[in-house]
Image (spheres, rainbow, N blue to C red):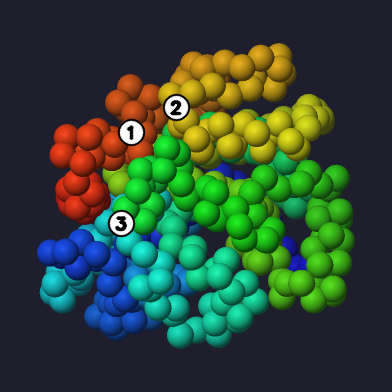
Amino acid sequence: MRTNFTGPSFTVGVEEELMIVDAESLSLVNAIETLLEDTGATDAERADGDIKPELMESVLEIATKPCKTMAAIEEQLRSLRRQVRETSALRGLAIGSAGTHPFAMWEDQRIVARPRYRDLISALRFVARQELIFGMHVHIGMDDADKTIHVANGMRVHVPVLLALSANSPFWRGDQTGLLSTRTPIFRQFPRVGMPPAYADWEDWERQVAFMVCSGVMEDYTYLWYDVRPHPNLGTVEIRCCDSQTRVEHTVALAALIQAMVKELSEHYEEGKRLAEYPWQMLDENKWLAARHGLEGEIVDLPSSERVATRALTRRLLDRLTPHAQDLGSAGALAGIGDLLERGNGAARQIVVYEANHDLHEVMAEIVAVTAG
C-alpha cells in the first residue's frame, strides 16, 4: 500500500460535521446539494478548505486544509462556518454544531445521492439510516509509517479524556438520554468502530487491512471507522472520537491538545520506548464512562487501576502536555480546554439551557446562535 507519511510532522487538519436547519422552526432540512451549488464548493482552489456532503442531506461537512499553526486552523474554521452560514441564510436556513440535533428524527432525513452512501445504506440498512450524528475529526501529519502505528496505539489511552471534554449530545429524538455523549452509543452500532485494536507495526496493520479487503467485508481502509486510525493517503493519524463542538474555540483547543498528545507519543517512539499494555476492555470501559458522565464522573487511571475524577485526571494530563504545546506554538489554544474544565463541556451547557424551561427549541436556538460566534 502506498503511503504518504512524509511530513512535515504535526501539521493539523480539522473536519466538522454541521447541521442544516430551518431558520425559524430549527428542524433539520435536506438541503446539502442546494448549498453546495450556492457555495461553489466544487472549486478546488478554495483557500480556506472544503465544503462537502456527508451521509444525509441535512448534514454539511467543512474541512480545513493542513495547517502549521492553530491560528491558521481557527481562521479557516471561522471562515468556512461564516461562508456556509451566510449562504444558508439566503435560503432561510441556518447552521448549528453539536453532537446530535435535540429533537430531529432520522426517519425524516434523505440519503445523499452519491454511490458511496447509497452502497453504505444497502450494506448496513437500519444501522446506517439512524446515524443522525455529528462529529469532528482531527488529522495530525506524520513522517513515518511505523511511528504512526505507535502513536495510534498510544492515542487509545487518551480517547476517553477527549470524549469527556468534547461530549456535546445529551438529547436525542426529543429526549434527555442521561448520557452526555449520546452520539457515542449511536455510532457504536456500526461495524469497525470504537476503540481500535493495537497493531504490532505498519506491516501488521497493512496485513490485517488487506485480509479484510480481500475477504470482501470492506472496499478499503477508509471503511474502518475506529476512534483512531492511520490515514496513509493523507499521511496523517486521524482522531475521530469527538462530538462536534458548538464553539470554534473548543474545536481549536481539542485539536491543539491532540497535536500535543501526538508529539509526546512521537518522541516516545523516537526514544525507543515501548507503550504500556492495557486490556482493551478497560480502554473501552473508560470510553463508556466518559460518554455517560462527561467531565462530571470518574474514569480508571490505568497505571494505578484506581478510579479518579475525570476532571482531575484531565488537568493532570493538560499540565504534562502544555510544554509540548508550547514547543509547537499551540499553547495559547489550550485556553479552550481550561474553559471546558471550568465551565463544563457542550453537553453540560445544553442541559443548563434546557433546565430553564424544558424547551428543546430553546436549546437548538442557543446552539445555532453560539455556532455563529
Q: Amino acid at mark 2?
A: Leu
Circle 1: element type = helix
Q: Which residue is mark 2?
A: 295
Label located before the other in sequence (1 or 3):
3
**Quadrant where the image shows the N terminus:** bottom right
Residues 262 and 314: in front is: 314
Circle 2: element type = helix
Residues 244 and 171: in front is: 171
Res 106 visible: yes
Q: Amino acid at mark 3?
A: Phe
Question: Any mark on residue 205, and which?
Answer: none
Residue 102 in picture, x, y percent from top left: 31, 52
Residue shown at the point (52%, 48%) measured from the top left: 184
Residue 14 in picture, x, y percent from top left: 45, 53
Few, some or many residues within 10 Å of mark 3 (<14, 14–19, 20+): some
* Cα–Cα gap, marks 3 and 2: 24 Å
Q: From the viewer's perspective, is residue 79 above or below residue 120? A: above
Question: Any mark on residue 348, and which?
Answer: 1
Q: Amino acid at mark 1?
A: Ala
Q: Which residue is mark 3?
A: 103
Q: Could you tell me if the residues under marks 2 and 1 are in contact, i.e. CB atoms within 8 Å?
A: yes
Q: Could you tell me if the residues under marks 3 and 2 are in contact, i.e. CB atoms within 8 Å?
A: no
Label located before the other in sequence (3 or 2):
3
